[in-house]
Image (tube, grey):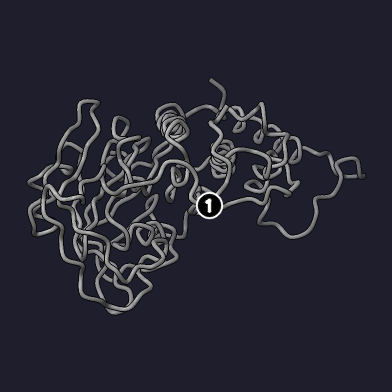
């Protein structure tokens, strides 16, 4: 195993125990005059895979913003890699909600990955052949870009313009971009959104392998837990104002979700092993844009659906197959 392939080392506390990569204690967030969620207690260890679940508009993306240090918690304590959020720098990789690339964009996939290495620097790098420029940094960057492209299995199309890659191919390249600086924590905001089912399965398998082989902790916002369920260590389930965290078998149950939503909720298992939640409340009507967690004014919550009605859905909400933005739906080769 090379140094680049070795899992990231966990920091140790004073008593020699491994320090959590992420720690939330009694955390809460307010936005628009209301509490999005509160009472969140969570620890994420090295190499653990955690999903953030819940219906639209409950603040799933806001939790990612808190971990990034973009939004401060209203209560409680939040630590990322032993420090306040926003202090870890390149040790935190981030993949925002799905971006679409114009088909005419000529930027190559490997160039998109390289932006994760030095895209935050001003100006153009000096050529390595100039006097006093040994080119070591450029060679190290090229090696690392090639490594992460290989890690995500994108060698066959990394040289192509990003706009000509399929949705699944683009997502692999963007994950490589987030990994290029060897982060210890990877924050993914709906990475399966707009992908067809084969690509959802492929990207979920890739993320699980990154956790297992690279020792990178992953916190991932998801609408449907089923593609990643078998790979999860913990889940955080958010509701209107409340939250519950724990192992999937402890959280995604009829008793736990009924208590969280204060209404009758049933969790059913289909013949193929998928989970379906029946009776989960609908998303609040005020959330016209489901990506605008926490930015709309206060409202009266939508009336919960009754068990057995058409509100039955795969955990935690229905997602269309294919690409809602009208991009091609090719399977990832």
Q: Quadrant of residue 328?
A: top right
Mark 1 element type: loop
14 sits left or right of 95 in the view: left
262 sits left or right of 299 in the view: left
Nearest the viewer among 79 and 307 is 307
Counting from the top left corner in percent of width and height, residue 221 is at 37, 49
- Packing grade of label 1 (10 A; few <14, some 14-19, many >=20) is few
Nearest the viewer among 330 and 178 is 330
Above or below, comparing residue 282 to residue 107 in the picture? below
Above or below, comparing residue 293 to residue 331 in the picture? below
133 sits left or right of 226 in the view: right
The residue lying at 76 percent from left, 40 percent from top is 138
Identify the residue under disc 1. 325
Q: Quadrant of residue 73?
A: bottom left
The residue lying at 90 percent from left, 40 percent from top is 129
Counting from the top left corner in percent of width and height, residue 103 is at 69, 47
Counting from the top left corner in percent of width and height, residue 300 is at 20, 75
Nearest the viewer among 5 and 109 is 109
The residue lying at 20 percent from left, 26 percent from top is 271
Residue furthest toward the front? 310
Q: Quadrant of residue 145?
A: top right
Counting from the top left corner in percent of width and height, residue 114 is at 68, 43
251 sits left or right of 186 in the view: left
Nearest the viewer among 135 and 174 is 174
Q: Quadrant of the C terminus?
A: top right
| Number of marks in picture | 1
The residue lying at 57 percent from left, 38 percent from top is 176
């Amino acid at each position: 195993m090379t140094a680049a392939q070795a899992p990231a080392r966990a920091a140790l506390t004073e008593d020699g125990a491994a320090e959590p990569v992420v720690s939330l204690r009694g955390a809460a967030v307010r936005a628009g005059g209301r509490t999005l969620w509160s009472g969140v207690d969570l620890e994420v260890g090295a190499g653990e895979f955690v999903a953030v679940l819940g219906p639209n508009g409950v603040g799933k993306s806001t939790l990612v913003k808190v971990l990034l240090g973009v939004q401060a918690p209203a209560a409680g304590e939040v630590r990322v890699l032993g420090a306040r959020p926003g202090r870890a720098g390149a040790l935190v990789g981030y993949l925002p909600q799905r971006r679409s690339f114009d088909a005419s964009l000529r930027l190559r996939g490997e160039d998109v990955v390289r932006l994760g290495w030095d895209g935050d620097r001003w100006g153009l790098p000096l050529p390595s052949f100039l006097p006093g420029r040994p080119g070591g940094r450029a060679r190290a960057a090229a090696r690392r870009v090639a490594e992460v492209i290989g890690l995500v299995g994108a060698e066959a199309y990394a040289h192509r313009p990003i706009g000509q890659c399929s949705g699944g191919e683009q997502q692999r390249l963007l994950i490589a971009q987030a990994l290029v600086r060897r982060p210890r924590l990877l924050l993914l905001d709906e990475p399966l959104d707009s992908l067809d089912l084969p690509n959802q399965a492929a990207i979920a398998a890739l993320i699980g392998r990154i956790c297992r082989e690279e020792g990178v902790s992953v916190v991932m916002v998801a609408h449907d837990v089923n593609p990643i369920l078998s790979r999860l260590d913990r889940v955080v389930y958010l509701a209107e104002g409340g939250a519950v965290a724990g192992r999937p078998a402890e959280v995604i149950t009829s008793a736990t979700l009924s208590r969280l939503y204060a209404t009758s909720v049933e969790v059913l298992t289909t013949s193929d092993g998928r989970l379906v939640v029946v009776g989960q409340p609908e998303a609040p009507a005020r959330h016209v844009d489901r990506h605008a967690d926490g930015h709309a004014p206060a409202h009266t919550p939508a009336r919960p659906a009754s068990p057995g009605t058409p509100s039955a859905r795969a955990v935690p909400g229905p997602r269309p197959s294919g690409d809602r933005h009208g991009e091609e739906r090719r399977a990832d080769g």
